Image: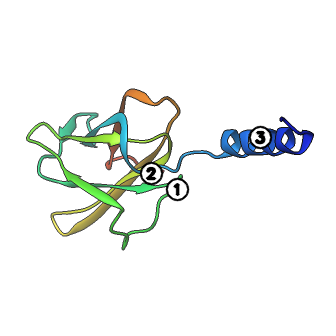
Amino acid sequence: MFSPLKGFLLVCLGIFIISCSKTAGPNGKATVHVHLIKTLNNNFAMNLANTNVMVNYNSSSFPGTTASGDNNVQTNENGLAEFNNLKRGDYYFFVISSINDTLFSGGQHVCIESRKGEQHIVIDIGEENPY
């Protein structure tokens, strides 16, 4: 027999399941492509190859120049880094790099809203205020 108490418990369970949201991180189906550049004085942009791009999961702001990130990927010869298999959520992609003994940093917040798909972002460490 179906009792009102069982019905109430099923409704509560359903609301609980619907209200839970996924946490950002690996083991998803989304991809973010990061293009890392440095703009020079004459508006010419230089691709930054072999540079470490980091990401913090569940974050929307720059973590500081001493952060190491939850995951990192090295850029290829074209300045591109690809982060695969991400879940829905907030991510902050950032770079902290030394070029000719000068520390440069920059980053960008990305919100992945759909389960699958690709997003493309550009991080320019030559900007005056890259945040």
Q: Nearer the viewer, residue 48 or 33?
A: 33
> Residue sitting at 77 percent across and 40 percent down?
10
**Residue that carries the numbered disc 2 in the rendered image:** 92
Which residue is label 1 attached to?
61
Residue 87 on image: x %, y %:
43, 42
Residue pushed farthest bottom? 66
Depth check: give the residue in front, 53 or 106: 53
Q: Position of residue 80 (x, y in %)?
A: 20, 38
Q: Identify the mark nearer the N-term, 3 or 1.
A: 3
Q: Secondary structure at mark 1?
A: loop
Q: Give yes or no for contact between labels 3 and 1 (Cβ–Cβ under 8 Å).
A: no
**What amino acid is labelled 1 in the image?**
Ser
Q: Helix, strand, or loop for circle 3?
A: helix
Q: How is the image coloured?
A: rainbow
Label 2: how many Cα within 10 Å (few below 14, some 14–19, many 20+): many
Q: Quadrant of residue 4?
A: top right
> Quick check: can you spot residue 26?
yes
Which label belongs to residue 95? none
Q: Are marks 2 and 3 in contact (CB under 8 Å)?
A: no
Residue at (89%, 45%) from the top-left corner? 5
First in sequence, mark 2 or 3: give its number: 3
Question: Label 3 to label 1, Cα distance in Å?
Answer: 39 Å
Amino acid type of the residue tagged 2 in the rendering? Tyr
Residue 75 vertical placement versus 29 (above, below): below
Q: Which residue is mark 3?
A: 10
Left or right relative to 74: residue 86: right
Q: CA distance from mark 2 to mark 3?
A: 38 Å
